[in-house]
Amino acid sequence: MPSFSKDILHDASSGNAHQMVSARPKAVTWRSILISLLILPLNDYWQVQMEIVRYSAHPSTISLFFNAVFILLVITCINELVRRISPRYCLERGELLLIYGIVCIGTAVVGHDTLEVFVPMLTYAFRHATTSNNWANIIIPHLKKPLFISNPAIYRSYYMGNDTIWRMKYVMAWLPVTLIWTAFITTLLFVMLCINAILRKQWTDSERLTYPIVQLPLQITSEGAFLRGGLFRNRLFWLGFLVAGTIDMVNSLNYYYPSIPTILTPGFGQSFLDISIYFTHKPWNAIGWTPVSFYPFMVGLGMFMPLDFLFSMVFFYWFWKMQHVLAAAMAWDRTPDFPYTENQSFGAYLSFCFYSIWLSRSYIKDVYNKVLGRPSRLDDSLEPMRYRSAVAGIFLGVTALVAFSAYLGMTWWVGIIFFIMYFALALAITRMRAELGTPINDLHFTGPDQVMTRIVGSKEFNTNTLTAFSIYFFFNRAYRGHPMPIQLENYKLAEQTRTDYRKWHWAMIILGGAAVFIGFWTILQLMYSYGAEAKSAMTFGPESYNQLQSWISSPTHAQFGQLMALCAGLGFAAFLQWMRIQFPWWPFHPLAYAVSSSYEINLVWGPLLIAWVCKSLILRYGGRGGFQRALPFFMGLMLGQFVVGSLWNIYGIMRGLPTYQFWQ
């Protein structure tokens, strides 16, 4: 068997190999920390340019961040050159993967659904309060002034541009605000880490979840990657790289020279064809936007997912579409928001959260005994945290979050429910990523704020609570780049490199907080330079405040249909899970039902269908051995598109030119 296949089998396995090695390799070193701190602002600059200034190639909207993979590949290649010239100075594998893990956390906290949403919110209400919207009377009095920027002399250049944040008056005004919110987001990250520290042993060592998202980084940095039989010496890998890279190269050239024909690209500058234009009559026009896309990297990523999950992602994508068609045919769509897709999805996620806890009930009981000092089968001496410390961290962290929410004006018991719902969703997303490698998990407008106001009605919450809901919109708008699964995947990287969990743990706490702080100032500098209104392609500032204005001005009552939709989603997902347990042939995966309802599935269902066909054929005619031998080709598809797409994107930023979007 080639060494590449051995690496795959080793990297996909889990267990306690790190415990059998007395002298662990290094990961958290001064040089890996320094390199991470140097790369974070460069990555943030690149990311904000893509996602806000240019509004293209959004890396934080999919599970595998292509910018982080590209950076890892560049550092690994440089490190290999250093290894050949002066081996004593080269980085170890654990150090490379720590840098990658920190860049992933930095990408998540800065991303499309976190700071890029939040930074505009800090000034937007003050800048855009008018006599027509009456924000000066209904919104601004409920905002805590120390947490926002209300002085026009400070925020004017943020919107107009042609300035720099590095003026003393700007720095002194923004510094306390960014420090407070950095502390808040870091507390969120800390609670997530504590939860992951408790669940790591059960999910990684006992249940042996496969962590598909980290397989490509593991292969890039494997010790034999550049040796004979390794990934970068494999012909199938370079064939896949050439296929994907050529497609992106030709399509990118077509963007500037239209006479050059595109490859598998139906529209100018696009990677998809919207087939909804062919459905113009009721009820079929209710399917809405339905793009048929081709993303080679997504085909490659799909090869690491289970077959039944791939099939179910496509099946349930059309299942959701047919719900809307049926609603239109029966005239049920006259009821606003019917068929309440978001609440169905929320119920399905809750079902999976409950099921994950149920599967781990025996383990959780042992953790409970360990925390109380009773006899337990668990040894937490080598875990990221002692379980007692982790439980204390969760309690203190949630208490701090609820207390801060009360300061914002949220009723304290609503705050408790809010964060229970939030971390339940986070746990479900984390488990999905670890078990199946879900390529997307966006859940647009399905956070605790939206679910509670839809079911109970905004009328039942006071204005201060609704204001706090709107402020927390920045980490609940969607969950595409959620940091909690990344943290658990970083623990997996620590296990695969046999490095110290606790050092990774503290590195993620400290560098995670640094990533938040750096992200704030990177966004501010770019906006003061370009102007959030003058040149920035997108700002999310109005979304939360428009929603708050609607809640206050047009309060809603409890909606029984919304509650029933949540219960239906929970019950249907539980039924699918029960059928899957009872009947091995059952083809419908409950997690696909939960994941396939939101926006991003529109872009990936086509590539996942191709991945399902390819994987089915390879396994049927080549068996497991043939599948292992074919994997380098699909990794080549991923890296080929990531490398060529990233290089063109960087070129466009440097030259100030638009470029072909290899990922929408």
Image (cartoon, rainbow, N blue to C red):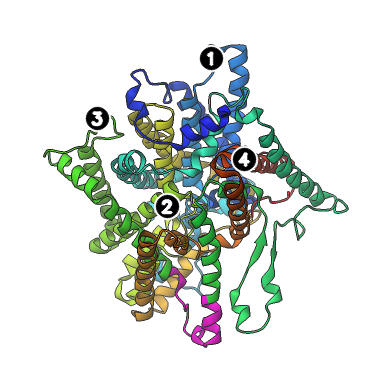
Residue 217, numbered label: none
Most common secondary structure along the magenta stretch:
helix
- Circle 3 is placed at which residue position? 381
**141 or 71, nearer to the observer:** 71
Measured as percent of width and height from the top left, residue 515 is found at 46, 39
Mark 1 or 3: the one toward you:
3
Is 329 magenta? The answer is yes
Measured as percent of width and height from the top left, residue 566 is found at 37, 71
Q: In the image as oriented, which residue stretches furthest toward the left?
A: 374
Region rendered in magenta? 323-343
For label 2, the crowd category at 10 Å Cα-Cα, with few meaning under 14, some 14 to 19 and many 20 or more, is: many
- Circle 4 is placed at which residue position? 630
Measured as percent of width and height from the top left, residue 644 is found at 70, 40
Mark 4 or 1: the one toward you:
4
Q: Is residue 358 left or right of residue 213?
A: left
* First-in-chain label (3 vs 4): 3
Looking at numbered disc 1 in the image, what kind of residue is underneath it? Tyr
| Labels 3 & 4 near each other (Cβ < 8 A) | no
Is 7 magenta? The answer is no
Q: Residue at x 48, y 48 (%)?
A: 437
* First-in-chain label (2 vs 1): 1
Measure the C-alpha gap from mark 2 to mark 3: 27 Å
**300 or 488, nearer to the observer:** 300
- Circle 2 is placed at which residue position? 432
Mark 2 or 4: the one toward you:
4
Looking at numbered disc 4 in the image, what kind of residue is underneath it? Ala
Circle 1 SS class? helix
| Labels 1 & 3 near each other (Cβ < 8 A) | no
Measure the C-alpha gap from mark 4 to mark 1: 34 Å
